[in-house]
Amino acid sequence: MGILRNLSECFTFYTKPAEKRIPKKTVHVRVKMDCEGCVKKVTNAVEDFEGMESFVVSKNLQRVSVTGNVDAQDVLDEVRGTGKTADMWPFVPYNLVAYPYAQGAYDIKAPTGFVRNVPQAVGDPKSPEMKMMVLFNDDNPNACSIM
């Protein structure tokens, strides 16, 4: 039965008009959750969401991650419907930004290992500092191997 259901989902996806198709993506929402009751309430709201393939509710990070053919605003509205304070996830992992202590990037309320996603923290790829960082990067196959 699983194969038939997957085939029917595939055909219904391609028969929808192009403007109604939503590409598969992961939506992260920050939700204020204090107890297991809050987690259960948010889980019940998200688990029956149309187009959702998987979801993760993390009380430690105060985050709900929904993966599938979903719209970010619809997920946010669904979570807000529980009565919880919710907004889009404003943080990026600490190791993905060049200047994590730039003005506005460091946030004391951010979970461990995350900083606020601001343009000042990214850095200009043409700047001399960024060129030097790439020169000694282990991921760069043309990097200096002396160090």
Image (cartoon, helix red, strand yellow):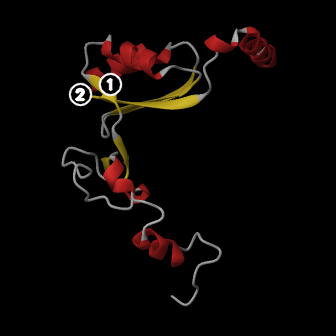
Vertical order, 106 against 85 (above or below)? below
Given residues 139 and 134, the one toward you in this image is 134
Asked if residue 96 lies left or right of residue 59, the reply is right
Circles 1 and 2 in contact, beta carbons < 8 Å: yes
Instruction: Check the image and report above or below for 100 versus 31.
Output: below
Visible residue check, residue 41? yes
In the picture of the structure, the residue carrying the numbered disc 2 is 35
Q: Is residue 115 above or below residue 27?
A: below
**Between marks 1 and 2, how big is the CA–CA gap?**
7 Å
Q: Quadrant of the N terminus?
A: top right
Residue located 58% across and 86% down the image = 145
Q: Nearer the viewer, residue 82 or 116?
A: 116
Which quadrant of the figure has residue 95? bottom left
The crowding category of the residue bearing disc 2, from other C-alpha atoms within 10 Å (few below 14, some 14 to 19, many at least 20), is few
Measured as percent of width and height from the top left, residue 141 is found at 65, 74
Residue 113 at least partly seen? no
Which residue reaches farthest bottom? 146
* Mark 2, secondary structure of its residue: loop
Q: Position of residue 118 (x, y in %)?
A: 32, 46
Q: Amino acid at mark 2?
A: Cys
The residue labelled by disc 1 is 39
Residue at image location 52% in from the left, 32% down from the top: 26
